[in-house]
Image (spheres, rainbow, N blue to C red):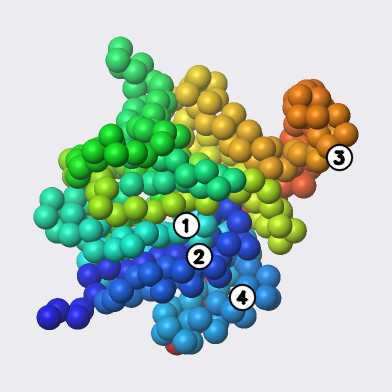
Amino acid sequence: MNDKPMATIAFVFRERLSSTIACLEYLINKTPGPYDLICVDAGSPPSIASRLRELASEHRFTLIRSEDYLTPNESRNLAIEQVHTPYVVFVDNDVQVGDNWLDPLVRCAEETGAWLVAPLYMQSLRGELKVHMFGGVIRVRDDEGRPAYLEKHQMQHSFLNQGNHLVRQPTELIEFHTVLVNMDAFRALGPLDEKLFNSSEHADLSLAVTNANKLIYLEPASVITYQIPDSLKAVDKAFFALRWSEAWTQATLDRLAEKYTIPRDEFGLRGVGAWVRLHRQRVLAGYPRIRNWFGAAAHQNFRRRFGQPLERRLNLHRYPPGKYVVGRKVRAEIITV
């Protein structure tokens, strides 16, 4: 029996801090070996950081610690530098992995030669389980060859039932909630683009792999669930607000426009920015007293007219682009166990 790991799991922060320990412990308990594990601690508070050190010592994995909040691609690139297996599997810290989730991803990569392999992405919001996505389409040119950003997710927000017969198949698009990457991709393409601060990193990698004439596959035998936040704990709010900040969004859209020669005001790019803002404000621009006193309809009207514009101004004030984008340097410590 071959007990040499084929894959390294790179566990990185996505948009919250409070989910870290529960999801990491669940991953460790649900994943039979062999595998290597790297966890990137992107600025967690002492209570979480100390528990991560305990888990690293107990389970003998590599812990990388930054005192600063990091972007997802910054964290992933730090992990990539420590990978010594043929594959790396990125897993976000708000994901609950399913039974036997890892082996099917590796097997699919081995059997197809794919550079990227994605599971069936499920999502859980307020206890309701739906499909988050199962592959999709990504384009940076329209049917007439004009610059345009088009991203479409298949089966998004649908219910999974017995009528859904999903099979292994190629796709154009994956997401980073969980994805296996052949390390040859990074040797050929270089590290992930750290100028993409908070969105479309998955699309950028998908496009790069396709442009290199390499395969991207979906493997429904592997299932994970993204835990969508409905509200935030106090420890999460600053991290979440920066992760989806106006500053990081503007910088990301500027990078996409430059990289793919798409006009900055193009409809698809504006749609990316609108999604980020709505995702942030869905949990940060909430006013429970107004909802409790006057009802959901009044609360929604207040949010649209006053709450969301106010939240946007506060976000720009708290995270000005000049401070949180220009001259940014990643500082991190590798903790050997």
Mark 1: secondary structure: strand
Asked whether the residues under the numbered discs 2 and 4 touch, taking CB atoms below 8 Å apart as contact, a structural biologist would say: no
Residue 249, percent across and down? Answer: 59, 39
Q: Earlier in the sequence, mark 1 or mark 4?
A: 4
Dot 1 corresponds to which residue?
95
Residue flagged by tag 2: what amino acid is it?
Cys
Please state which of the two labelled residues, at mark 2 or mark 3, is closer to the viewer: 3
Residue 61 visible in the displayed image: yes
Q: Earlier in the sequence, mark 2 or mark 4?
A: 2
Residue flagged by tag 4: what amino acid is it?
Ala
Residue drawn at x 50%, y 19% is: 267
Residue 197, percent across and down? Answer: 53, 47
Q: Earlier in the sequence, mark 1 or mark 2?
A: 2
Dot 2 corresponds to which residue?
23
Residue 183, percent across and down? Answer: 26, 61
Please state which of the two labelled residues, at mark 3 or mark 4, is closer to the viewer: 3
Residue drawn at x 40%, y 25% is: 150
